Amino acid sequence: MSTLRYIDAIRTALDIELRRDPSVVALGEDVTYGGPFGATKGLADTYGTRIKDTPISEATVMGLTVGAALSGLRPVMEVMYIDFITLAMDQLVNHGAKLRYMTDGLLQVPMVIRAQGGARGSMGAHHSQSLEAWFAHVPGLTVVAPSTPADAQGLLQSAIRSDDPVLYLEHRGLYWQKGEVPDGDDAALVPIGRAIVRRAGSDVTIASWSHMMGAALAAADQLAADGIEAEVIDLRSLLPLDLDALLGSVGRTGRLVIAHEAVTQGGLGAEIAAQVQERAWAELAAPIARVGAPFVPPPFAPELERAFVPDVDAIVAAARRVLDTPSRAARPSPQSVEA
Amino acid sequence: MTSVPDPLGMLERMWLIRAFEERVSELYARNQIAGLLHLGIGQEGVAVGLAWGLEPRDRLFGGHRAHAHALARGADPARLLMEIAGRATGYCGGKGGTMHIAAPETGFVTATGVVAGNIPLALGSAYASTVSGDGALGVVAFGDGAGQTGSFHESLNIAALWGLPLLFVCENNGYAEFSPLSAHTKVERLARHAETYGIPAVTVDGNDAAAVLAAVRDGVDRARAGGGPTFIEALTYRLRGHYEGDPGKYRELSELADWKQKDPIARFVADQGLEAESPAAEARARAIVDAATDAALAAPHASVDQLRTQVTAEAVA
Amino acid sequence: MLPDLPGEELVAQLRTMLRIRRFEEALIRLAADHDIGHFHVYVGQEATGVPALALLGDGDVAYTTHRNHGHLIARGVSPAGMVAEILGKATGINRGKGGTLHLASAAHGFPTTSSSVGGPLPIAVGSAFAFQELGLDRVSVALFGDGALEEGAWHESINIAAMRKAPIIFLCENNSLEALGQKANEYPSSTLAAVRLTDLVDPFGVPAVPIDGTDTRAVHEAMAEAVQRARTGGGPSFIEARTVRWPGNRPLWPQLLTGETDVTFAWDPSGIPAEHERWWSQQDGLLRFLRELLDAGHVTREQAIAIDTEARDEMAAAVTFALESPYPEAEEAFEHVFA
């Protein structure tokens, strides 16, 4: 085990995969310098031209990444801020995501897009969004969002080894958090599509991912002080979702709160809630609650930004709300309401 | 006249493309093919001149008007027609269709329905070969309408910066969709853009397959010698509408008649002195297309069982 | 050389330049103790922006970038409101929602400010298009850095502007001279293949001139010609104003590496620190302008010092105002998303 910061774990994953596989390359704006946060710092010293700086041409560099993946490489492209991926959506969505299907498997696109986001540090509306729901709506993509250094390394390694285009979403609020990461080329690997229970509990399930996991765990601590045991699930993989893990937990608790930093409206929480209620209606003792950002662009002022990002209290309140819902047996039937 | 090493092979392939596209047009008119079809009739000279200058390992990316390029590279006409007709035995199992054909084993990687969408893909392919050392050139064929996109400009810049082994082949047929190039840009020769990035650029008569081949060979030689990208602007004309069913009211009939006089196949026959061989070459091509048609129409339609397959590798495994 | 303008107008431009310089210096000091996010300063480019924007009239619009502070002050936006915005205060010109990257003031002809590289270019063409359609005698100015030329949006924008003969001025502030990894005025760089930036414009038939961005006469004349061309139906113009990157802009966050500006350097080089001798004596456009004004007798040393003192006092008061201003109420985060 080594203690690594989240950002070091990202660099370690790149380092291992670049060393293991000569077809892996990393490209993006200023990646030889290390990018604004240092995720790729020093890699060019070891891997030379396989670490490639690109012009500020997101649309074309995304297509270049797809083309390189079609032609024998496993490229890892860095989009400096997830907000700028808007410039590259055609190549990502119309080409990268669809080529396997459109050619019935004649072609494959083994590439990773690393992008960091989240509202942190007052960077304003062009540098702060959480856009995972857009990509989880696109057939052909894989979307992961690690919350710990171990997952940051393990999921990035798995993403690079995957034969599909993977959106690997980082949160800059996590970059400096430390955690234990297994040593070795393969020891840290985390399978894509598997959630993990971070805390066991029987009263309510809180499902979250990325930076919001910290708030979810803190909310569980706060609830525990009142004797409420929350089970906290880190989804990690957003497409495909680990529905089995969610359904298993909801089967135990009967109550579900989904917490994410993205705006609630049209967010991934809506899709997860729909899938869970379609399959586990009988087990649900209360309506599923969602916690997310208000439906506004990320504001700049520190006060407004704090109000924008959902916090521990919001998750606690949502958990209490679903716990306060009377169980079904105690609820009047629809007919008696009408009468 | 420019001499070419395999004139009869080139002529036969041009006839094959012509016959294939005419057949596609007929099948569409008879409702035996669905979709939004863009045919390359009149542009065979560019496709064949280009293909004859490449090696099998080179990777060509086409645009929405790409049947000709796939056939020029050696795609099986039957499997191609099956794909265009949505059959399970088509190259892409009927999932791609006319704008998303692929025959990667021939060096025709894929096509795109997005104008200029293929340019960054070929750029990435050329970049990949500089890393892997596989010696494959990236090649992209696109129309003049792509010249006004940001991706075109960004790709020229990166190809020049990185000295990539890439051929940009602009088939300037004078019309982007339904309007003349002059309605899209003030720039008459798109090769000018390449020059601004220091990319060697040449404008050739695209209806002269031998001239196209010569330009391609120059570019290929440069790229293989590590000299970076080349831009070829081939001036040509589509003798059909933008898509099948396009009434084409934006063009003068006299203009169409003029260009029919410059038909690339007739031009090639005359230039290469193939008058005696041409009828038999055409007949062979039409026979291949007849057989391909029979095979395609007899082939099973794409199966709904396949609707959910090949979305991701994970699902496949 | 000085523009052919009355002395009082030139002195007014000196005042504006000094106000910008003192604003940016005050901001760099302020950023040492306050988190204002990633910010960019206009130091060293005042001699471009001030004479250029002085030629615009009411109703003309300008679209600027992440490096926008100088442009706004040049067109009369209140520095106090700007500092307040940068600190995220309720008294900020955008009520704390924009921050340094998105400072805008429609009343002063800055409808919106994008911090996406190349982002303002299509919007600026859109304004020019509207002016044409509405039959208005107005000009749209796109202010951008050399990095924007790597974006496809640039190519699409100038193509459409040229086609339509739109009343737009592309003012490219190439501040990359002697930037990291580059020698003076040397393109191609690691990210742009063109040998001369104006080469990229030539195919479109748009008049394009490279000028020294520290030469106020050159700026004034090129801009006056471009404004005249736009107002009289002559279509777009492209101006490349070249400046040497201020050493304080080289770190990720601006720093006062050169020390603060001392106007006496204009006549007394003995005080110039040896380490930054070239910057203060040759490359700083503001001091060059001041030297030329002194030589021409438009201003005396004493007057220059007095103008500078006023500018410093104004900026000190602006900072105090901003620091004492309240933060916006958290509820404001939810306002102004829709009409």
Image (tube, coloured by chain):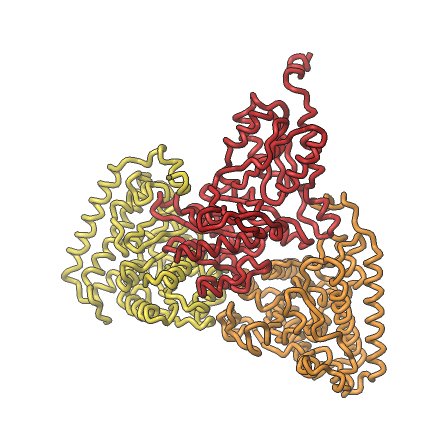
Chain colours: A red, B yellow, C orange
Q: Position of residue A58 (x, y in %)?
A: 52, 57
- B13 and A198: which is toward the camera: A198
> In the picture, which quadrant includes the C terminus of chain C?
top right
- A84 and C6: which is toward the camera: A84
Q: Residue C189: in sight, yes or no?
A: yes
Most distant residue in the front direction: A1
Apparent side of residue B61 relative to residue B275 in the rendered image (left or right):
right
Q: Position of residue B267 (x, y in %)?
A: 25, 64
Q: How many marks?
A: 0
Q: Is residue C188 above or below residue C264?
A: above
Apparent side of residue A61 relative to residue B92 in the rendered image (left or right):
right
Residue at x 73%, y 80% (from the top left corner): C287
| Quadrant in the rendering for residue B262 | bottom left
Q: Is residue B166 above or below residue A12?
A: below
Residue at x 54%, y 37% (from the top left corner): A196
> In the picture, which quadrant includes the N terminus of chain C?
bottom right
Q: Is residue C201 above or below residue B177?
A: below
Q: Position of residue C149 (x, y in %)?
A: 55, 66
Q: Position of residue B273 (x, y in %)?
A: 18, 66
Residue at x 67%, y 27% (from the top left corner): A322
- B297 and B278: which is toward the camera: B297
Q: Residue C160: in sight, yes or no?
A: no
| Quadrant in the rendering for residue C321 | bottom right
